[in-house]
Amino acid sequence: GVHDSRMGGGPPRSGDAANESMKLTQITQNPMTGQLDIRQIQPNTTMFPSATSTLPQRQQISNTVFRPHWNLPTMSLSELAERERAEAIQRGEAQKIAEEQAKFQPRRYEQLVRDGMEDDEKLVEASAKLDRDWDDWKEANPRGSGNKMSERGDRNF
């Protein structure tokens, strides 16, 4: 290996060249053989940037380390209000369209009379079928016939 007179550490002596470039020693270990590999590397400015260029990076790191432990808002209140207002307008328009389409859907006959649409024969027939189906379901499923606690056990045996 190369022996440097300053290997023991300490500041450079006055006899050394003041503008001698810094040398970096890289020590790696071969994972297969376990041997140490020692290299002298000439560092470039990307490895060790100057103090003036590290200030923004140092500030950036400081900002990420020294921050509140709670989540900060991602938008302002005015942005949130604008978004909520746009969504409310969109919901209102969608509801108006759905109400207009629902006028021509079959429903209970009483509702047709209330809306003044009892003259539409196709709608009255579809509503009558809907009423008959609902009455049949009500007869097949009387009130209180659901899953009761008193009916424990299997009735098939």
Image (cartoon, rainbow, N blue to C red):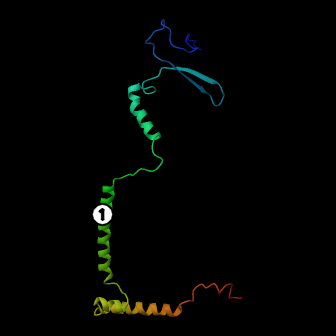
Query: Relative to 36, is 88 on the left or the right?
Result: left
x%, y% of residue 79? Answer: 31, 56
Q: Does residue 89 lie above or below 58 as drawn?
A: below
Query: Relative to 80, is 142 on the left or the right?
Result: right
- Quadrant occupied by the N terminus: top right
x%, y% of residue 44? Answer: 44, 23
Mark 1: secondary structure = helix
User: To which quarter of the image does residue 157 belong?
Assistant: bottom right
What's the amino acid at mark 1? Answer: Arg
The residue that label 1 is drawn on is 85
User: To which quarter of the image does residue 31 belong?
Assistant: top right
Q: Residues within 10 Å of mark 1 (few under 14, many from 20)?
A: few
Q: Is residue 77 visible?
A: yes
Q: Does residue 111 lie above or below 40 as drawn?
A: below
Q: Is residue 122 visible?
A: no
Q: Which one is in front, 110 or 121? A: 110
x%, y% of residue 32? Answer: 65, 30
Q: Residue at x 48, y 20 (%)?
A: 42
Q: Residue at x 50, y 18 (%)?
A: 23
User: To which quarter of the image does residue 35 belong?
Assistant: top right
Q: Residue at x 39, y 33 (%)?
A: 56
